[in-house]
Image (tube, rainbow, N blue to C red):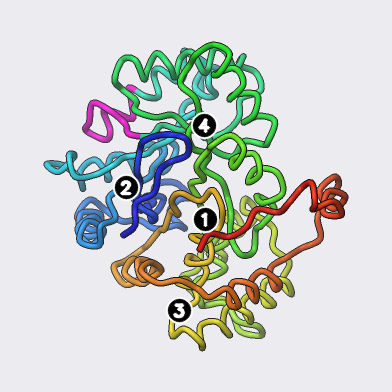
Amino acid sequence: MEYRLLGHSGFKVPELTMGTGTFAGRGNFYKEWGNTDAQGATRLVDICLEAGLTMFDSADCYSKGGAEEVLGQAIKGRRDRVLISTKGSMRMGEGPNEMGSSRWHLTRAVEASLKRLGTDYIDLYQLHAFDALTPLEETLRTLDDLVKAGKIRYVGASNFSGWHLMKSLSISEREGLARHVAHQAYYSLVGRDFEWELMPLALDQGVGTVVWSPLGWGRLTGQLRRGQPKPTTSRLNSPLVLDLGPLVPEEYLYRVVDAIDAVCRETGKTVPQVALNWLLRRPTVATVIIGARNEQQLRDNVGAVGWSLTTDQIAKLDVASTLPRTYPYWHQLGFQERNPLPTPSA
């Protein structure tokens, strides 16, 4: 397992991170993802550590705290062997302050996460979404205070737009506060709009990308094929999950899957392995979050590392997955001599 620096920091993370969205399975939304209990999670953590995968990502809203609780039980007695990233700012109660990135909510959210995880510090804490109602100065000073208190090691954001992230970085620099070293973002072979603005920003500002849902919200598992029914266990069978996820046109999806299948035949790898390996070649990507309902899925996903796609194979996947850009990005493409596109890593 390769380790990579997380953005402009000295913190190294494994190229794959284990996501815990499948842990606990509380509530209509998360039960469609999975319902791994503490015993099952312990086994998955065992497999991860054997492979050198030491980072585990969660969020307080996953199963209303249940995922963090299960993860805490699964790593009990081996906290020194793992890295923990988690997130806060989503609604966690009925009160008017039980959400967002205010000092009131973030301080309580971090304390609650620490308790559920059974630890006294979090390696990477990320704002789960942008809060337009709370002044960024308040949010960033709160995070800085939590870093100084030793409760958080590094801070990041998730699901920010370009201007959200850039404004945050600017305030941190101006005020001498802990800055976002990571941005956890949706990015996949069927979701490449991340490349239009957030990737160039991350390159310019030294922000590492933590990729969530790298298999396109369950579309690149290898089970979806043109003219075939969806698998019975797919989360895409749930209208609730499907409606809340990214929109992917059906013909576009199958075009990408066809290209992945061609690369699979050349490499002997599975669809998820090819899709994940493609992401690991992309600029700014520090770590890719993989999820698994069971051992077989986890072992298959871990097989995405230790090898590399060829330049021709990457180009084949790039062509199949490219979509027309919206303004001003299509206009900028006409002036690549002064706006060069980011290039994949070797």
Asked whether 120 falls inside the magenta stretch, the response is yes
73 relative position to 334: left or right:
left
Q: For the residue labelled by badge 1, is the local secondary structure a helix, a strand or a loop?
A: loop
Q: Residue 244 in the image: state x and y as whole percent.
A: 62, 50
Q: Which mark is residue 90?
A: 4
Q: Residue 129 in the image: state x and y as whole percent.
A: 57, 33
Q: Which mark sits nearer the N-terminus, 3 or 4? A: 4
Decide: marks 2, 3 in contact (CB < 8 A)? no
Query: Spatial distance from mark 2 to mark 3, Cα to Cα?
Result: 23 Å
Q: Which mark is residue 284?
A: none
Residue visible at 39% across and 37% down in the picture: 86
Residue 310 vs 18, above or below: the answer is below
The residue stretch that appears in magenta: 111-123
Amino acid under label 2?
Met
Q: Place residue 323 in its image quadrant.
A: bottom right
User: Which class describes the residues within 10 Å of circle 4: few (<14), some (14-19), or many (20+)?
Assistant: many
Q: Which mark sits nearer the N-terminus, 2 or 3? A: 2
User: Which class describes the residues within 10 Å of circle 1: few (<14), some (14-19), or many (20+)?
Assistant: many
Query: Spatial distance from mark 4 to mark 1, Cα to Cα?
Result: 18 Å
Say which residue label 2 marks.
55
Q: Residue 58 in the image: state x and y as whole percent.
A: 38, 42
